[in-house]
């Protein structure tokens, strides 16, 4: 039964209904959405909006799975905006992907404004303030820019290329409407130059700068008065992980008295793990040190403000950290991309003294420099170095058994290496940060349940005992989807992988060729993806159809855009393409799952979690590996049907779905029960003759 929360507001009469009733009036059959906005009535959306509204009024949390097409963003934005304005409390909306963040800011919130404008008694909600919360480093600091421009002629600080970049940033900052956010400058600014002029510095002081000329202060002011604040999961958990948020005794998650909706919540456990842990990389350490003194280019802060001895201290620190990362690369990683480190004191011990000598000296220098800006810049770099030393030490000591200590390559072609400390189980931290704060946290996504229950997800995010609800997709999958499963594919785990890869390439080609619209083929690793690309690429292009290859030369968002515009292409995608790509219509009329998306069991974090499960008497495959793969599988399938009129094929090329006992679990996650099996040799009769819808 749906309860309507009748929180009456003093002075409201019958023509001025309570907020819970307002939400009902908007989403109900013949409600405002339908009559004034010409949007269809969706009972699932109506229920979700009511449940969200109820949770907000009770300051209670909620897990809500809303299948594709429920219209979940309006179902939380509308009650959230009404509640925020009546209660005068900030409403935080967090998403995982930039595309959803943009959709909320550019499409959904303006739609809410329009909706509130339609009815007289809702008009009071129309003028809500919305803003984006971005990390400080995303904003241009006009004070640092002025300093940099003043010293640009000094060759010890800037090279020609960097000087040009500085001028480009300065010109852009003067443009009308410029909000000083890095994302607004196209092409994106050079990382190193931006690092010197961004607001992410202890130089920042409101007292010294005029709020009118400071982009960051303006953004903070907008934040202070905003009714709704949009953020991404990474920043949210970075802030929560760094202990931001109201005092323990004040209720609220990120701000006092706020309330939070996390969309794309299936990503929360992974993002929280990453941001509740620590990482320190070779690139970042070298950049910080070279910012002080770059002996090769003869530039850096210490050219002007330091002595010869100071520069030598930087060189010694760089030598020590270079040696440390060399040890990580050669001895800890070897041929691996990522590897767990099991023993304490795995790093060479002599890195610490040179860093300590340097930071001690820099502290002293920053206290005695006459030039305030230089003093604060030196202090800023010192603090960065000190926080790096803290991570090095924690890695060296390994005294927290609840963390996994590991090393990995990162950056282009794995050019850099980093140390990672990741919590084994972020659930207790999530519980403290989200559910024990006395306010409402609503977590929603199209894929939270498995086998019809929310138990697994609740456990992952520390939400045991929190209310949960599911609204299935209103789309007609029975009618609009056909499922095909290949029954004779070689096992992808065979030692000799060539038969598997050749078979896979042929199947991908022929299944995609058979569709007049576009096909998205999802891979679990880049090696298989590249093999298929090399094997079928030229044949595919002879069909006069485009091939889009993840990781080749276009960034992800451009690949998706071109694939969408083309309408009949083949997109080979890995990793992030399993989620977050939204291509309605015939441009994506088939999703091919090339292989069941099991995680690499040798990944350090997976390995450590499996070990823990085993030590507690559990079975890592059934409790960790399989549920994780099922969740990703569902995400992949969800790429196909994006709206009511979408139709298409789900084609699964991994025959383990039919051969292995766990295959049934995957089949049970399909949006419909019936499927056709086919083989390469009978493709013509069993796939080509049956599959496909006329575009
Ligand atoms: S207040 Fe901080 S970010 Fe703003 S201009 Fe001044 S130093 Fe830069």
Image: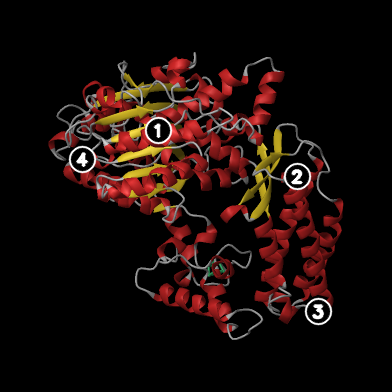
Residue position for label 2: 332
The N terminus lies in which quarter of the figure? top left
> How far, Cα to Cα, is label 3 from label 4?
70 Å
In front: 327, or 378?
327
Residue position for label 4: 121
Residue drawn at the location 72% of the way across and 54% of the way down: 388
> How far, Cα to Cα, is label 2 from label 4?
65 Å
Q: Is mark 1 within 8 Å of ligand 1?
A: no
Residue 149, image x, y percentages = 54, 81
Give the quadrant of ligand 1: bottom right
Say few, some or many: other residues with alpha carbon within 10 Å of mark 1 (under 14 / 14 to 19 / 20 or more): many
Are the residues at dot 2 and dot 4 in contact (C-beta closer than 8 Å)? no
Residue position for label 1: 636
2 or 4: tag closer to the N-terminus? 4
Q: Nearer the viewer, mark 3 or mark 4?
A: 3
Q: In the rendered image, which quarter is residue 35 located in?
A: top left
> How far, Cα to Cα, is label 3 from label 2?
36 Å
> How far, Cα to Cα, is label 4 from label 1?
43 Å
Residue drawn at the location 45% of the way across and 76% of the way down: 168
Q: Is residue 578 left or right of residue 28?
A: right
4 or 1: tag closer to the N-terminus? 4
Q: Is residue 692 left or right of residue 221?
A: left
Residue position for label 3: 307
């Amino acid at each position: 039964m749906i309860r309507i929360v009748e929180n009456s507001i003093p002075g409201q009469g019958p023509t001025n209904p309570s907020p819970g009733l307002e939400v009902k009036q908007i989403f109900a059959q013949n409600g405002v959405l339908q009559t004034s906005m010409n949007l269809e009535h969706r009972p699932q959306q109506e229920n979700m909006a009511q449940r969200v509204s109820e949770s907000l009024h009770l300051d209670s949390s909620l897990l809500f799975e809303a299948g594709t097409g429920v219209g979940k963003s309006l179902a939380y934005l509308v009650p959230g905006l009404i509640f925020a304005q009546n209660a005068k409390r900030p409403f935080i909306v967090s998403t995982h992907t930039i595309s959803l963040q943009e959709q909320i800011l550019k499409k959904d919130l303006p739609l809410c404004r329009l909706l509130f404008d339609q009815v007289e008694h809702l008009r009071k909600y129309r003028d809500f303030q919305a803003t984006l919360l971005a990390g400080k480093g995303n904003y241009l600091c006009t004070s640092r820019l002025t300093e940099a421009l003043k010293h640009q002629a000094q060759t010890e600080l800037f090279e020609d290329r960097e000087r040009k970049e500085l001028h480009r940033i300065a010109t852009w900052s003067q443009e009308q409407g410029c909000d000083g956010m890095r994302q607004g400058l196209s092409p994106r600014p050079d990382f190193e130059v931006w690092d010197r002029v961004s607001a992410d510095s202890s130089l920042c002081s409101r007292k010294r700068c005029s709020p009118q000329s400071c982009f960051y202060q303006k953004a903070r002011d907008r934040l202070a008065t905003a009714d709704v604040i949009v953020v991404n999961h990474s920043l949210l958990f970075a802030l929560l992980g760094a202990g931001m948020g109201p005092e323990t005794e004040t209720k609220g998650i990120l701000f006092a008295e706020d309330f939070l909706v996390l969309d794309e919540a299936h990503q929360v456990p992974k993002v929280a793990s990453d941001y509740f842990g620590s990482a320190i990389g070779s690139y970042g350490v070298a950049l910080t040190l070279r910012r002080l003194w770059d002996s090769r280019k003869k530039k850096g802060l210490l050219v002007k403000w330091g002595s010869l001895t100071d520069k030598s201290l930087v060189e010694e620190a760089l030598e020590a950290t270079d040696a440390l990362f060399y040890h990580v690369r050669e001895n800890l990683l070897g041929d691996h991309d990522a590897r767990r480190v099991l023993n304490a004191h795995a790093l060479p011990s002599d890195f610490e003294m040179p860093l300590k000598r340097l930071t001690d000296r820099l502290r002293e220098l920053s206290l005695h420099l006459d030039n305030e800006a230089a003093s604060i810049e030196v202090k800023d770099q010192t603090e960065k170095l000190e926080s790096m030393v803290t991570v090095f030490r924690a890695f060296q000591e390994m005294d927290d058994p609840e963390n996994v200590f590991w090393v990995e390559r990162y950056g282009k072609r794995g050019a850099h290496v980093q140390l990672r400390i990741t919590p084994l189980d972020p659930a207790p931290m999530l519980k403290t940060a989200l559910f024990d704060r006395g306010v409402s946290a609503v977590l929603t996504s199209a894929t939270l349940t498995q086998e019809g229950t929310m138990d697994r997800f609740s456990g992952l995010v520390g939400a045991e005992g929190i209310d949960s609800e599911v609204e299935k997709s209103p789309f007609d999958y029975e009618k609009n989807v056909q499922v095909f499963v290949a029954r004779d594919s070689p096992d992808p785990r065979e030692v000799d992988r060539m038969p598997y890869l050749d078979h896979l390439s042929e199947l991908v080609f022929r299944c995609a060729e058979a569709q007049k619209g576009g096909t998205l083929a999802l891979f679990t690793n880049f090696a298989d993806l590249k093999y298929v690309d090399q094997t079928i690429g030229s044949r595919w292009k002879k069909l006069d159809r485009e091939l889009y290859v993840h990781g080749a030369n276009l960034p992800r968002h451009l690949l998706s855009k071109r694939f969408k515009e083309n309408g009949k292409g083949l997109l080979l995608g890995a990793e992030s393409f399993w989620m977050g790509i939204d291509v309605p219509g015939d441009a994506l009329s088939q999703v091919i799952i090339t292989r069941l998306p099991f995680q690499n069991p040798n990944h350090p974090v997976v390995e450590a979690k499996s070990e823990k499960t085993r030590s507690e008497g559990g079975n890592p495959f059934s409790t960790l590996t399989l549920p994780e793969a099922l969740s990703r599988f569902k995400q992949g399938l969800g790429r196909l049907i994006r709206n009511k009129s979408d139709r298409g094929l789900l084609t699964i090329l991994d025959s383990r779905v039919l051969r292995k006992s766990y295959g049934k679990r995957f089949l049970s996650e399909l949006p419909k029960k019936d499927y056709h099996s086919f083989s390469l040799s009978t493709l013509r009769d069993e796939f080509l003759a049956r599959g496909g819808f006329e575009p």
